[in-house]
Image: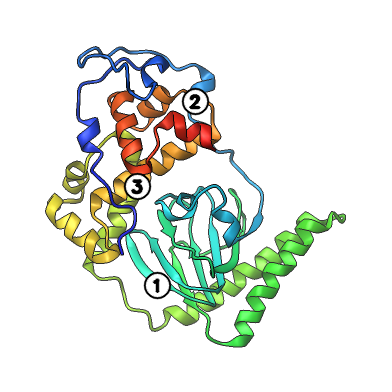
Amino acid sequence: MKLFSGTPLSQFSDRPAADPRPDATKDAAKAPAPGRAKTHSAAPETAIPEPTATSPLRIVPIPRLAAGGRWRIEAMRSLSEPLLLWFTRGQGRITIGGVTRGYGAHNAIFIPAGVMHGFEAGAQTYGTAVFFGRGCPIALPDAPQHLRIRDVGPQADLSGLIDNIQRELESGKPGAARAAQHHLGLLGVWLERHVGEDGAGAKKPDAARRLAARYTALLESDFRSGKGVAEYARALGVTPTHLTRVCNQTCGRSASDLLHDRVIFEARILLAETRMPIARVSEALGFTSAAYFTRAFQHRTGKTPSAFRRSV
């Protein structure tokens, strides 16, 4: 089964720029004629919010992450903080850095900040997500890790560490935040030990996986630029055909699917969590006009940007 497939956004965005005023976003009904590009300065309140230097440690049940739509966990995205997913029940697929693999019960998956990922979570999936917070001082792995914890002892240790962190965060007692950080440090040690054990016999990623990882890292840094797959392929020194073949091999999705899924996820977040005018969202994500952004967004989500914003 393929997730996140859809028509390439290049069908909608490779046109001359249009008037970027917010009025131009009414479901693209009044899109200006091509060639009428204008420059403007966005007001401070319409700028893309910058993440703060730090953010708090948080623990969230995995089923709750999908509140508001499965796109919140399935669509490609990255976080500005490290994340640990501890699955205790169920199974599915997870894509990290352009590589898809299955996960099951008692799988611990660590994702560093800035690494693109998305995962399935069915009705029977349960577990915990540990968001380490931006600016986390704990020593953590610098590469993604997928640990299959088969022994009962380490399973209980990890669950106990997460429970201790949660208990302190909810206690309201003096020194609770400091105590939670100490337990988090022990969680970092648990990861270090099990990454070392698991990595001893691990195979090095092959050329296809290395290229997929390079592509997703480049995509994450540039997805707002409006670049197409051909430009990414050129930067990576390969042909678009080869890049697409590799992505299909490593994650079952084309290079354009990964790109477009990342862009539309960001659009959803900006529409749901900011008051940025739709035309500004379009511009910020590299579309040449609000009209083409509306068409692309509706094609992949089934709703216009304005309808999606009203629904969340």
Q: Is residue 214 left or right of residue 153?
A: left
Mark 1 lies on residue: 102
Q: Is residue 78 left or right of residue 187?
A: left
Amino acid type shown at disc 1: Gly
Quadrant into which the C terminus falls: top right
State the image coordinates of residue 162 (x, y, percent, origin top left): 67, 68
Q: Earlier in the sequence, mark 3 or mark 1?
A: 1
Amino acid type shown at disc 2: Met
Residue at mark 3 to residue at mark 1: CA–CA distance: 20 Å
Q: Is residue 246 left or right of residue 281?
A: left
- Mark 1 lies on a secondary structure that is strand
Using the image as rendered, state which of residue 30 and residue 108 is in the foreground.
30
Q: Is residue 68 above or below residue 144?
A: above
- Mark 2 lies on a secondary structure that is loop
Mark 2 lies on residue: 276
**Residue 131 visible in this rendered orientation of the protein:** no
**How many neighbours does mark 3 have within 10 angstroms: few (below 14), some (14-19), or many (20 or more)?**
many
Mark 3 lies on residue: 261
